[in-house]
Image (tube, rainbow, N blue to C red):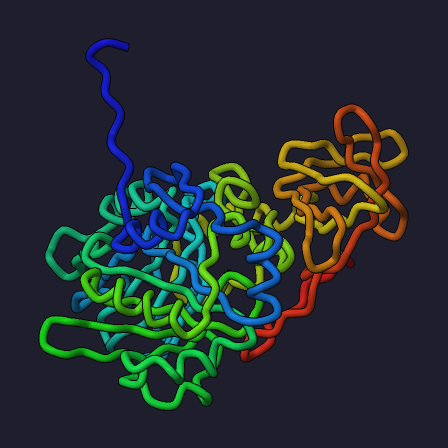
Amino acid sequence: MLGVSEEPLRQTPLHGHHAKAGARLVAFAGWDMPVQYVGIAEEHLAVRQGVGCFDVSHMGRLYVDGSESVSWLETVLPARIASLRIGQMAYSVLCTTDGGAIDDLAVYRCSSSRFLLVVNASRATEDLEALEALRPRDGSVVIEDRTLQEAMIAVQGPGSLHCLHQISTIKRFGDLTPLGFFRFRQHREADDSWLLSRSGYTGEDGFEIICPAHEASALWEALVAAGVTPIGLGARDTLRTEMGYALYGHELSTEIGPIEAGLEWALALEKEMDFQGRTALLTRRQGSRRLLGLRIDGKGIPRPGYEVAQDDKIIGVVTSGTYSPSLQAGIALALVDLSLVDQLRQAAIIIRGKQVPAQFSELPFVVSRVKRRLRKRTVS
């Protein structure tokens, strides 16, 4: 339409490397991002069997500081913020007042009063708006958005530890072997701040590195020179789906809250300090909609929005679906009504009008190999 112009896509500090490598670039949450380099299945297996690196610089990085940062975050997030030690992370959900999700995020405790919130790129604006609306105006809490000043690279796979020990710029963090899952280390030189955590979105042992934007290229080049495979967003999605990890806009939304998404393990519903959405979350516990895993029998690839049936009765809908390169089968995460489901019996996913047989499956679909094994979710 004449007179209407679209915002140009943002580019991460590593955009030039992706273009030079011939990656297929797509618009994602306002960023120009690599969806694949050589192929999703090949990149997926490179992470499961070796080591891959992801440019996740598009994710939002919001720093919270101030004399009341701890008590304020306790009222904002359903996590035990005060009990986090410096160098420890937590997974949490920023909830709506009615128990839905504004976003899911990772919380890092960087000092006694300073915290880092890493949020989804697709929700960064909404997150900042929601946090600013809740922030006290007396100066006791400040929020700084450093997304554009920093880069973030994930190194994932069974070979990640060995690989990082060979990278000179990573040696500033010392021996990474004893670093536990959801723990991190920091390093500061002048105005340059680095952070390395043992974390990720793949279910493999791995690390995520936050560094100044101007240092990202050298780190990426060193990783690729060491034999690390660049991985796009396509394989990132198949890897997380195999693990049953939630993706905002699929398993979580303002309508689908953490209770329905099977994330109650991440909610400190009984903590002393009240927080946004607690009353509604406790009420939602009584509901019957929950996230379950499904594996296709035979051929067929489920996609988001496909209906799930049992005995010709619609019992739910697929939130995420894909072909699993590890299992060589179609897999799905589906939001179903437990009051209508017999999880011990076969179900079906309706693909192009045809009921394709599927079995309920434990989550994760494949074994987690993070440093400290995550709690296993079942369909019981």
Q: Is residue 276 visible?
A: no
Pick the residue in front: 295 or 301: 301
- The quarter of the picture where residue 309 lies is top right
343 lies left or right of 284 = right
Q: Is residue 306 visible?
A: yes
* In the depicted structure, whether residue 65 falls above or below residue 86: above
What is the x, y in percent for residue 24? 44, 42
What is the x, y in percent for residue 90? 43, 68
Q: Quadrant of the C terminus?
A: bottom right
Pick the residue in front: 377 or 178: 178
For the point 70% across and 44% down, the residue is: 288
Pick the residue in front: 162 or 280: 162
What is the x, y in percent for residue 47? 56, 65
20 lies left or right of 203 = left
Q: Quadrant of the N terminus?
A: top left
315 lies left or right of 372 = right
For the point 67% across and 68% down, the residue is: 376
For the point 38% across and 71% down, the residue is: 225
For the point 26% across and 63% down, the residue is: 217
* In the depicted structure, whether residue 170 falls above or below residue 224: below
What is the x, y in percent for residue 331? 71, 48
